[in-house]
Image: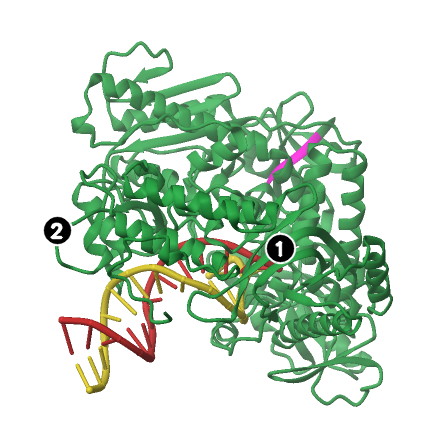
Chain colours: A green, B red, C yellow
Amino acid sequence: MKTSFIPLDYDSFDFEGRNYSLIIGRDDKGKKVCLIDSCENHLWAILKEKISESSIKKLIEKISKIELNEKGRKTRVEKVELKEKRFLGEKVKALKIYATNYKDLHSIADRLDFKEIKKRRGYDIGFATKYIIEKKLEPLKWYEVQGEMLNMSSEFGGIDNILKSDFVIKLNSFKESEIKDYLPKTLAYDIETDEIKIGEGEILMISLVGNDFQKVITWKKTPTKKKYVEFVKNEKELLKKFSEYINQISPDILVGYFSDGFDMPYIKSRADKFRVKLPLGIDGSQPKASGGVNQSTRIKGLVHVDLLKFIRTTYAQYMQSETLSLNDVAKEFLGDTKKNFKIEHSSKIDHKKMDDYFEYNLQDSILTYNLLEKFWPDMLEFSRVIKEPLYEVSRNGLSKQVESYILHNLEKYNEIPEKRPTREELTSRRVREKVEGAFVLEPKPGLYENVAMFDFTSMHTSIIISMNISKATFIGENPKDKKNSNSIKTRMGEFYFTKEPGFFPLMIKELFEKRRKFKAEYKKNPNKITKARSNAFKLLSASIHGYIGFFGARYFSLESSSAILAFVRKFNQDTIETIKKKGFNVIYGDTDSIAFEMNGKTKSQIKDLLKDLNNNLPGIMELELEGFFKRGIWVTTRSGTAGAKKKYAMISEDEELKIRGFETVRRDWCNLAREVQDKILRLILKEGNEKSALEYLKRIVKKIKNREVKLEELIIKTQLKKPLSEYKAISPHVVAAKKMREQEIPVTQGGLIEYYIAESESKSKLVRDKVKLLDEKGEYNIDYYLNKQILPAVENIFQIFKIDVSEIIEGKKQTTLGDF
DNA sequence: GGAAGTGCGGTACC
DNA sequence: ACGGGTACCGCACTTCC
């Protein structure tokens, strides 16, 4: 038979001592389809140089005879082929060794201790990855597939009778078809429990939300008018109902928020306790948890997505939200918020409140469902670009995504994949000395008029490409062929890289060009998909240097990482010097940027300067105009007279502000201080002097002294980064967290702690002794907010105008500032 | 018992 | 383990007189 098909999930099974792939997906009518395909497994044995043909022949014979009988499996070498390959750029002769079961590739590699063999590789790549590389049946692309339908058959031990699928097809052939739209069938879920620790409490309710499906299942019998609430007898029945509904709906994706870390483990632990089976897999198998600290749960044939993980790696760096809580993320992306509901212990909840609880539980699934829809184009394109299944792509960090991309693109360069680092390598890489990072120019404090800013386009990546840097192109500290090389001095020594183009920089160049191409495509034809594709390439391209310096990477290279950073410093410093020599006053620079006074020159003259600088840059390196600014302000550090790095504010010609590093953008300062500072920066940058800013400050100070400021403006929010018991220094936010715990308010690691500083009778001078939670009665501490929040936020700004605001902010009696 | 120095802790920049 | 070096700054803690 023939059908359309889009692969969603990849799995495998053994039959008669052989591996088969099981690919789960849909056809274009929405029917669930499983494909069964054979798949050859292989590993590589790289041969030493100058091995005679006859020795190779003998070796092949010996290897062909390898048979294993371990772990109740019989696995044997099926065939061995001699190939001309490359490994880390070197031409090599290698044996491609096929085995009947991929699970034993590692054991076979262990048996290859022949003297003719130099290295063994390719035994540590996941089955799905290998299958996709070999067969090119790639995730989330549409295919026209042809095969034999299995129906009540006995083939493969009658597997088609077990699989919960509309069609099971033994694959014969396939070809890519034109891309049609695809929207996954999604089901979101969320649980409510009476105890946060996994398995220690009861699951009170579970909500499920699909396209036209909304349910809250609970055993907490309460009169309610909510139609979506369904009652069951007890927690055990709740769990059964949960899997019943999932199987009935049969979604492509089961999505939760923090569900790898909470919902799924909780459900599993309660199911274990009650001995309830959760047959959610396509073959009736149970969800399987894996990984230690960073746990995740996999369900066969049903893609379990923990949206938090995807958002964290792909979006967090560009987000405004204070936290990555479902509430904040939904607010930012959906303009929607969670139902405001304070969780209490179930025993305390009365009937009316129970109704709100149901609503709250449902709402969480609705938000999760809507967020998945929102992020779907990005997940889809990531999966297509990286060629890894959704389950992996939705969880992996950027380094892992880069590595997957590399593995899927090695073939073009005829490269044998490098192995994962061994445990010993990991330990030694982790304790290595730090590589020297980027250069930051100390600014000269002041208010500047007409500022131009340049920055290097994708600096690290373009250095890798232009200087041909990688593990394989590194040729040591004193190579013979210095002429044909790029070199740079680092703290660790002078490192040389051949100019002979290496596969790694070439691959990155191609990636970089695709990034350009898809960015242009998006500009020309802006829509969700082109945007997502452009974004996927952008993120991948920006993560290459991070990957090279990541200790878990196959292509990790400390020399490369340190050389890249040395070039980063060199190019920025050289450019600063050149701009200075042309007579400009350079104000500031950080890593890849340079800000300088335009010095009466016109924009077009500045653009000429840019062109000139670009003409002298090597390879694909490029400096671009970040912008022209009407004014910019740089201040001193709090403790001294030096210019503060990573802290500045500029205003563009259309009065848009670019504020970096100031308290305004820091969440651990109270809103009042942030707003006052923001307003003052705005006034000064707009007007070019401090007059109205000063008037404004005086009004605010008066307001504070008259206790006219609302408490919510004074809340200080700080994250609790580790378990309460591990803190050596008991700082205010730790005290606040302890208070919360006393009041049985859940305190979670990573959660935001909110408190304010109140007037107090105690003589203690410690801030922490004045900490109060928001619902604790008290009055805000005027002295603290004036001298420890407002003053530090504005002092340095007015100092630029030689104004000492501490005189304006009276009431600073106890504080002594040694500098005065 | 207070001043000065040290380091913990959180957050931001790129 | 899933990016990591540079930087700022408040606050508690330590040390010293």
Q: Tell whether label 2 touches label 1 (CB within 8 Å).
A: no
Question: Does residue A771 sit above or below A47 in this rendering?
Answer: above
- The chain that hosts pointer 1 is A
If the image is split into quadrants, where does the N terminus of chain A sit?
A: top right
Residue A215 lies in quadrant? top left
Q: Nearer the viewer, residue A521 or A186?
A: A521
- The chain that hosts pointer 2 is A
Q: Return the mark for residue A559.
A: none
Q: Nearer the viewer, residue A580 or A513?
A: A580
Q: Is residue A583 visible?
A: yes
| Label 1: how many Cα within 10 Å (few below 14, some 14–19, many 20+) | many
Question: Does residue A218 sit above or below A260 in this rendering?
Answer: above
| Label 2: how many Cα within 10 Å (few below 14, some 14–19, many 20+) | few
Magenta span contains residue A7: yes
Q: Nearer the viewer, residue A445 or A777?
A: A445
Chain part drawn in magenta: A5-9
In the visual, does A731 lie left or right of A689?
left
Question: Whole-percent x and y of residue A485?
Answer: 80, 80
Residue A448 lies in quadrant? bottom right
The residue tagged 2 is: A761
Question: Whole-percent x and y of residue A342?
Answer: 28, 30
Q: What amino acid is labelled 1 in the image? A: Gly
Count how many numbered circles sit on residues in the image.
2
If the image is split into quadrants, where does the C terminus of chain A sit?
A: bottom left
